[in-house]
Image: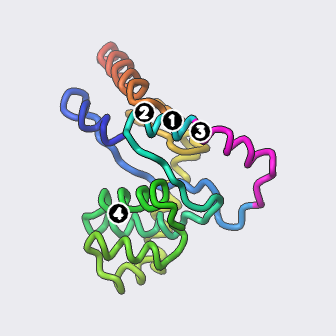
């Protein structure tokens, strides 16, 4: 998504804004074996896209974790001006380093590594305002019809779901730009 922002930011006004979404909300019932198998069956495609499009060898962390603490930490990091660095650290930790991003120690170490104060970060994880901001994002995602990640919304109107190759995202931007030009 950052690659899309770099290539189409100036020409089409593309900016990436990360929003919270929980795949496995707190107290969610356990996944059925069938559903988990379906998810696992889709992972090779995701890994292939990451490898072919971005040169990344994925090594994901534990399955079925509670992402809420990481999302709350992201809201705090954004408030401190280091949201993109925090997001990159969390994504790297989970998808490339197989770390448990529901582990408060792991999150705190990442926060400190990007320049956040350890005690302030730990306090933020317990501060209701950031949890409320996460919930606002999640409610908005459901209103858009998002039920998985990634979900990309363009101009508050167009939804692209799932891990898509870079070319597909570029085509979406071009198509949407064309439609917007017609409307003006």
Task: State the residue lying farthest toward the right.
Answer: 33
Q: Which range of residues does the magenta coloring cover?
A: 29-44
Closer to the N terminus: mark 4 or mark 2?
2
Asked if residue 7 is among those painted magenta in the image, a careful observer would answer no
Q: Position of residue 101 (x, y in %)?
A: 51, 66
Residue to which mark 2 is pinned: 52
Which mark is in front, 4 or 3?
3
Residue drawn where x is 33% and y is 67% of the image: 77
Residue 181 versus residue 166 in the image, above or below: above
Element carrying mark 1? helix
Residue 83 versus residue 162 in the image, above or below: below
Mark 4–mark 2 CB contact (< 8 Å): no
Q: Residues within 10 Å of mark 1 (few under 14, many from 20)?
A: some
Closer to the N terminus: mark 4 or mark 1?
1
C-alpha span from label 1 to label 3: 6 Å
Asked if residue 38 is among those painted magenta in the image, a careful observer would answer yes
Mark 4–mark 3 CB contact (< 8 Å): no
Residue to which mark 3 is pinned: 44
Mark 2–mark 3 CB contact (< 8 Å): no
Mark 1–mark 3 CB contact (< 8 Å): yes
Residue to which mark 4 is pinned: 86
């Amino acid at each position: 998504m950052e690659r899309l922002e770099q290539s189409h930011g100036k020409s089409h006004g593309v900016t990436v804004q990360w929003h919270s979404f929980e795949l496995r909300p707190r107290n969610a019932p356990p996944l059925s074996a069938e559903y988990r198998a379906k998810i696992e069956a889709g992972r090779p495609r995701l890994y292939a896209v990451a490898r072919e499009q971005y040169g990344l060898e994925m090594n994901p962390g534990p399955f079925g974790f509670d992402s809420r603490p990481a999302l709350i930490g992201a809201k705090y990091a954004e408030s401190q001006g280091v949201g993109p660095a925090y997001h990159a650290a969390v994504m790297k930790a989970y998808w490339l380093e197989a770390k448990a991003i529901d582990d408060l120690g792991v999150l705190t170490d990442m926060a400190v590594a990007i320049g956040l104060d350890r005690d302030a970060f730990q306090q933020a994880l317990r501060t209701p305002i950031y949890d409320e901001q996460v919930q606002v994002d999640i409610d908005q995602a459901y209103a858009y019809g998002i039920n998985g990640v990634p979900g990309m919304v363009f101009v508050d109107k167009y939804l692209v779901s799932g891990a898509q190759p870079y070319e597909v995202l570029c085509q979406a931007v071009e198509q949407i730009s064309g439609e917007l030009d017609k409307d003006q």
